[in-house]
Image: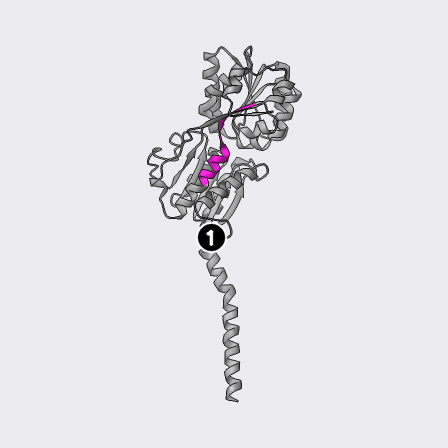
Amino acid sequence: MHSDQLKRREFITLLGGASAWPFAARAQRAAMPVIGYLNAASRDGLIMRLRAFQQGLKDAGYADGENVAIEYRWAESQLDRLQELAADLVRRRVTVIVATGGAASAIAAKAATTTIPIVFMVPEDPVRLGLVASLARPGGNATGLNFFSSELVEKRLGLLRELVPNALRVAVLVNPTDASNTEATVTGVETVAHAMALQVQFFRASTGGEIHAAFERLAPERPDVLFVGGDPFFLVRRVQFATLAALHRLPASFSNRDHVEAGGLMSYGTNINDVFRQAGIYTGRVLKGEKPADLPVVQPTKFELVINLPTGMALGLTVPPTLLARADEVIE
């Protein structure tokens, strides 16, 4: 009898231990740091960017689902949703917010919290945007990467003019929903166009339908070249851009290589995948306890020129050997 009681007690103890296992697992998950990932665009077309970000996290010692969790919030190019999405991440008490997909994401995150660390990626000067006190010593709860886009307007227009030497009439397409980026691009283009004696016409689009309509409007104006502003939504619609530029026989310049890989003619800008990888590394440093106030804003030192030769040939262009020699990659 005594033996039976002992066995029963051991069985109950075993049961108690087994029932505690899920609680232990849940407690471990609850203790896992959470990254709130905020992006102005959509997951579609950004898979390579996410892989690069996760590779950076891995380089810093973190893997999604193992020792860190990621909560994704996508604005689907509706920038007025960013504020609520950022507020939702704050309510969920995430460990760090990673704001990608343009300046609007970073501004929304910064407005939502002064305490949760923020790692941003912006195409403009973060000091001018009010995100940090200075590049060397950000001073607040935000730091990150300034990957340049609007600052490269002069270089991009110069390269496009080198490829199409007789170009005088330039159509410029921007996304009006990202006011800060659009203003910087418009100002940059107007300054450079005046110096280069170019005639410029601006067109605006913030949806797939508006991009199509913009091409319908600009075609009768018979521009010599097309300059597409750097924009996360435009990146998602890169196949549409390549198709319409080919249809209207327009030599077009873009801000990153993804457009050229999709059939666009030329791009000049930062290697964005590398920027996302660096954002992953910076996020890892914050997770380990480093303060954004002390982490300098990273600025890229290398920019890449990518040219699509078949697209150039289809447009009847001869790419100058000097330009080919300077290209970081030529798609043949």
Residue 210 vs 278, above or below: the answer is: above
Circle 1 packing at 10 Å, graded few (<14), some (14-19), many (20+), is some
Residue 257's place in the image compared with 14, above or below, is above
66 or 69, which is in the foreground? 66
Instruction: Say which residue appears at 52% left-offset and 64% top-offset.
Output: 22
Mark 1 = which residue? 67
Magenta span has 76?
A: no
Which residue, as the protein is rendered here, is positioned at the far bottom?
1
Which of these two is toward me, 22 or 307?
307
Magenta highlight on residue 269: yes
Position in image of residue 193 (x %, y %): 48, 14
> Quick check: 208 left or right of 16?
right
Q: Is residue 112 visible?
A: no
Q: Residue at x 61, y 19 (%)?
A: 312
Per the image, label 1 sits on a secondary structure element best described as loop
Which amino acid does the dot numbered 1 rest on?
Asn
Q: Is residue 284 left or right of residue 217?
A: left
Q: Position of residue 63 (x, y in %)?
A: 49, 49
Total numbered circles: 1
Magenta residues (range): 266-279
Q: Where on the picture, by quarter, is residue 137?
A: top left
What is the residue that sits farthest to the right in this orientation? 247
Residue at 46%, 16% in the rendered image: 192
From the viewer's side, name the closer residue of 91 and 267.
267
Measured as percent of width and height from the top left, residue 41 is found at: 55, 36
